[in-house]
Structure formats: structure tokens, C-alpha cells
Image (spheres, rainbow, N blue to C red):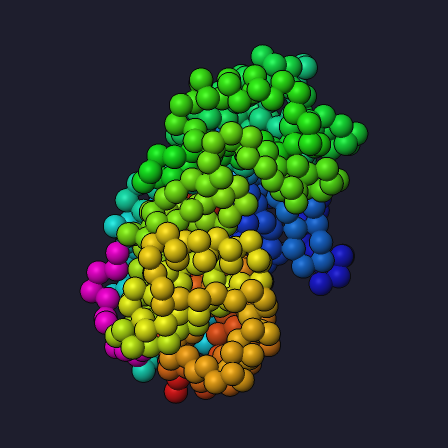
Amino acid sequence: MNRSEIPVAKNKEYIAEIVGIGHEGEGVGRVNGFTLFIPGALPGEKVLTKVVKVKKQYGYGKLLEVVEQSADRIDPLCGIYSKCGGCQLQHLSYEAQLRWKRQLVIDNLERIGKLKVADSEGNDEASTEGKQTNSPSAGEKQTNSGIVVYPTLGMKDPWRYRNKAQVPMGEEQGGLVGGFYAQGSHRIIDMDTCLIQHERNDDVVAKIKDIGRRLGVSAYNEETHTGLLRHVVVKVGFRTGETMVVLVTNGDKIPQVDEWIAGIRQALPEVVSIVQNVNRERTNVIFGGKTRVLWGQEYIYDYIGDVKFAISARSFYQVNPVQTEVLYGKALEYADLSGDEVVIDAYCGIGTISLFLARHARKVHGVEIVPEAIADAVRNAELNGITNVDFGVGAAEVVIPAWQNAGMQADVVVVDPPRKGCDAALIASILSMRPRRIVYVSCNASTLARDLRLFEDGGYRTECVQPVDMFPHTVHVESVILMVRK
């Protein structure tokens, strides 16, 4: 489309019909066939929008007025929802969020993976009970009409689910503030309550800010690279109640460190670990390379199901423990273990899925590129007395072929890759190993669809996809996928 053919102009107002939701949660609108992305608008609505940016194929609009309202629109519970950006879907009813997340997965499978999805008739009710009803048993899921995509498994209470807070710190009128970045900037807005955080996280951050103000602690300034406190990170064990505080600092020395520790211990008796992480780099990455315990334990502990995990300051641990149990339970179901299988867990992290599977398999081999994560995985296996699991350090696409060359043959392979999906060399390695089943745990529907296409072309059939809502009120969706060798 030439510029002269674009039917909208910057700073002009138009009525747009909203036909979908974009990947960032914005409404996808049409004005005379031209696409406008309009934050805050919902499918089925007509809205008055002001065009703020125009490109050749699409543009961006600001929502001025909802002319015709969707039946799924609700009032957000959070008072700062419009400013924060941490959640993107609070104005959409939770049931509609679950339906949209399922559709997002379907759209990616069809458009990117060129995969056929079964007719959704009779399969369009999202579940908020954390379980799938009337779900066929493993091995009975594939239909002749395509891949079955089940209703999204949601939460009965989709609030206060996050067990970890990472709060950037700043200064306002000489006093310490902490909360969130204003949209489109790194200006920190002070905040006391976040409705998707565990209440304990809010309480800990608020009291640490109070202590910091009383002691005159300076906040880090990105522009000048001066000041001390960059972030406050809080981790809470949902089942154990144990709490860890991590102070991320721009330098080794913390003035009045003894007063800091005493103040935290007095105000927050549930805190069992106070840790310092040093990050001197000019970066938006939260953690630096140096971590030391200032007081208390090096780890806090929590459970997923009946498996106990040690969580350090730098450990990756799923932030929604309630839904993690749902997610891993579904992965275990799809693995369909009888007790005699050899399983490979690629991208195993601190061993969360590996240890779930090991209780039901003959042997589990986990691989992860981060050495510290493997050290945690070994520790977690020992913590639970699980001896039929071992872990290797390195890139999965390097380690797994080496295992195969040494004679290892896996019956089941589980992959839980980062958002960029599986490395192509890893997919090739798995295809050459020819396991009976592959269970794919995905946090990104587009890279999932790309990878499933490669597995399908390599001799596997995608039987079913189970979306799981790990992050209510955001645009993110996780999925568990079962593939079987053709």
C-alpha cells in the first residue's frame, strides 16, 4: 500500500471496528480495511480512536471512547492498571482471557506451523478448576480431523499468584521509591500494591522502602550510573512461608549494613534469608555475577506437589506454583510412564520436571547449559532422596548427541525451552534418537508452532495441545504438547 492510499492520517480521529487482540494485548482494529493497534480496545467493540503513528501496513491508535462495548469488558481491579503495563488483560473477563489464549495457540499452529487443528465444537469451555474434564487418556487424543487443542486450564482464583517480585528502585524528592516503570520510559512510579503478587511480596517491599528511607539509602540512577540500590527482589515459598530478600546493589559496600539487616529482621520475622547481589554494569539485566548471603539461609524451600525444592537468589523457579503443579501434572500424564522408561529432560533447569518424572520412570537424564542450575538440580535430587536421575551441563544439542553416541536410547524426551524455542540441532538430535513420545512444554506459541512443524516433518504426529494459564491477566500462555512417533 502506497502512502497516498493509506486511509488514515496521524492525529485524525476515526471509528474503528475491533476484530481481535494482538500479541501485546492491544485491540486489533480496522478502519476502511486498514489495521490499527489500539491498546484497551476489545474484540467486538466499536471505538473512537486517535491515530498516533502510521506505517505502510498498519498504524497505532489511542482509545478515546468505547462506542459499542463488548460483553466481555469489565472494570480492572487494579487502580494503576492503565499506567503500569505489567498486566495487559485486566479489562477482559477471566473466562474470555482463557478463550483468547486457547485461540492464540490455535492461530499460531495454523498460520506458522501449517498444522491442522480439530474442530473446536464441544471443546470451547475454558476451565478455571485447574483440571481438564472429560479428557481422553494418553494415546486416545489424536482425531482424524486434526490436533486437539483443549480449553485453557485457568485458576479458580486468578489473583495474588506470583511468588517472586523484582522491584526497580528510584528516588523522589530525596526519598527511596520502588514500583514499576511508567509506560514507554524508565521513570519509576512508586507502588505499594500489586494484585498479581503474593501479599507477602507487597509487605516486604513496602517495609524495605521504609527502612531504606530511614537510613538514607540512595537509589541507583541509570543515567549517571551512581547510587546504591538497583532492585529489591523478594521470593516467597507458598507452602513453607519462608521468605528471601535480595538487595541488588551498584557496588560491594552497603553503608549501615548491620542496621539494614536488623531493621529487616525486626520488621519482617518471616524473612529467613537476606542476600546481596552486586551488579555494577550499565544494563537493564537485574542480576550481576556476584552474590553473597548477608544473613540467614542461602536457600528458601518450597514444594511443587510432593517434591521439595531449594531456591537460591539466582535460581529459576516457576513464579506461579499453583499452576506449575497443573502444568507438570499434564506433562507427566502425556509422558505416560509405566516405570520402565528412560527419559531425557532437555532444558531441565533446577530439575523441576526431571524430579517429577523420576518418580515414575526407570531413569531420567537432565541437561541444562547453566552450571549453577545443574548444581541446584543435583541438590534438589538429594533433598528428595531421588537416585534414578542424573544431570549433565552443556547445550542440549551437544550433550544429547554425545549421550546417544555412548549408547543411550530414550523412550520419552521432554523439552521445556526458553521463549526462542528449541535449537534446530537439538530437534535433529531428537529425531535421530527416535523416542516413542515427545512432550513439549512451551512458553511461546509462535516458536512452538515452528518447532512442531519440524517434528511433524521428521516423523512425529502432534496429538494434542493443552494450554495452561500460568500468568492470568497477561498475554502469556504456556502449553503442554504430546507428540508420538508415526
Coordinates of residue 87 in the picture (x, y in percent) = 49, 40
Above or below for 24 versus 282: below
Frontmost residue, 294 versus 467: 294
Above or below for 413 versus 153: below
Frontmost residue, 294 versus 316: 294
Q: Quadrant of the N terminus?
A: bottom right
Q: Quadrant of the C terminus?
A: bottom left
Q: Main secondary structure of the magenta part?
A: loop
Q: Determine the image quadrant of residue 248.
A: top right
Frontmost residue, 240 versus 80: 240
Coordinates of residue 323 in the picture (x, y in percent) = 35, 50
Q: Is residue 414 left or right of residue 112?
A: left
* Residue found at the far right of this picture: 224
At 55% across and 70% down in the image, what residue appears? 396
Q: Which residues are magenta?
A: 131-143
Please tell me whether residue 298 belongs to the stretch shown in magenta. no
* Count of numbered circles on the image: 0
* Residue found at the far left of this picture: 134
Coordinates of residue 330 in the picture (x, y in percent) = 32, 62
At 46% across and 21% down in the image, what residue appears? 265
Above or below for 123 versus 280: below
Coordinates of residue 104 in the picture (x, y in percent) = 45, 60
At 57% across and 58% down in the image, what residue appears? 371
Above or below for 37 versus 339: above
Q: Determine the image quadrant of residue 180.
A: top right
Residue 421 is at least partly visible in this image = no
